[in-house]
Image (cartoon, helix red, strand yellow):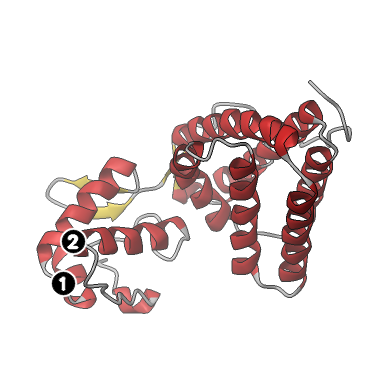
């Protein structure tokens, strides 16, 4: 079935200062990643152009880029569809992000000062408040803000683009599997542990805490692979396991 985009509130307010193709791409990528266009949704070039109020050219360009990202697939004689979550791509992305963020948080712990420590604690406090208010969108926004700020503190801000690219498939898992309070509480506890180590200047401890935190997403991969099999493709590539809690301050 060809999805009616209006059902997903895909309004596009065109910015005359930006290429239409880039705007259409950003919009569709955001809705696919956040599950507003779930795996299997059919995407008609003509329907997209009509409902977004643009010509077919920027839509075609966007779909090509989304296919390169692994977010849509073209089936000959059938159409273009939102791709299922590729489990192999997710695990590759997790490895890339873990490697980069463990390296940058190590540096952040060496660069942090009193003002930066206050800012870190404020972000986590605001994130907890958003979660308790049931504002999941705000919770996710602050989650991203914390990780971005830690990378910035490392002095290696150029790494951010690579991390954001790696997050693409991981964010699909995050949104499609949903969030529950036990998991949200664990995320916040992890964040508190990380910033405690960073503020204390404990670079090794911060790196260890970040590594454990980065692997929390693997539980979400498990959840999606086992409870929403129609949304994923590929094998899990590892046995399902129970998550263990790390020891605070353990350095590796």
Query: Which quadrant of the structure image shows residue 141?
Result: bottom right
Residue 151 visible somewhere in the drawing: yes
Residue depicted at 25% across the width and 67% down the height? 2
Residue depicted at 26% across the width and 58% down the height? 22
Left or right for 203, reference 103: right
Residue 241 visible somewhere in the drawing: no
Query: Which quadrant of the structure image shows residue 200?
Result: top right
Q: Which mark is residue 59?
A: 2
Circle 1 residues within 10 Å: few <14, some 14–19, many ≥20: some
From the top left corner, tell me how far across and down residue 85 is, in percent.
Answer: 44, 45
1 or 2: tag closer to the N-terminus: 1
Which residue occupies the foreground of this view, 98 or 34?
Answer: 98
Which residue occupies the foreground of this view, 210 or 234?
Answer: 210
Which residue occupies the foreground of this view, 208 or 153?
Answer: 153
The secondary element bearing badge 2 is classed as helix
Q: Which mark is residue 54?
A: 1
From the top left corner, tell me how far across and down residue 48 is, in percent.
Answer: 21, 69
- The reply to whether discs 1 and 2 touch (Cβ–Cβ < 8 Å) is yes
Quick one: which residue is furthest to the right in this view? 248
From the top left corner, tell me how far across and down residue 138 is, in percent.
Answer: 62, 68
């Amino acid at each position: 079935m060809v999805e009616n985009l209006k059902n997903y509130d895909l309004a596009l307010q065109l910015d005359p200062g930006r290429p239409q193709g880039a705007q259409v791409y950003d919009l569709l990528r955001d809705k696919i990643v956040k599950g507003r266009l779930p795996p299997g949704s059919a995407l008609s070039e003509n329907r997209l152009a009509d409902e977004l109020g643009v010509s077919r050219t920027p839509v075609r360009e966007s779909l090509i880029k989304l296919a390169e990202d692994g977010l849509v697939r073209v089936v000959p004689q059938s159409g273009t569809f939102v791709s299922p979550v590729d489990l192999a791509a997710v695990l590759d992305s997790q490895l890339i992000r873990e490697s980069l963020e463990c390296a940058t948080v190590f540096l952040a712990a060496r660069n942090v000062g009193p003002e930066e420590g206050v800012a870190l604690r404020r972000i986590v406090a605001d994130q907890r408040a958003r979660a308790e208010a049931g504002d999941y969108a705000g919770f996710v926004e602050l989650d991203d803000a914390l990780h971005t700020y830690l990378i910035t503190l490392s002095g290696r801000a150029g790494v951010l683009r690579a991390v954001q690219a790696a997050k693409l498939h991981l964010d699909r898992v995050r949104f499609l599997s949903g969030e529950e309070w036990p998991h949200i509480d664990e995320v916040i506890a992890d964040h508190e542990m990380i910033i405690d180590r960073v503020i204390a200047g404990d670079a090794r401890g911060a790196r260890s805490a970040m590594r454990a935190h980065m692997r929390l997403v693997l539980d979400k991969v498990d959840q999606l692979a086992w409870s929403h099999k129609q949304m994923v493709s590929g094998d899990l590539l590892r046995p399902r396991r129970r998550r263990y809690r790390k020891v605070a301050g353990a350095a590796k």
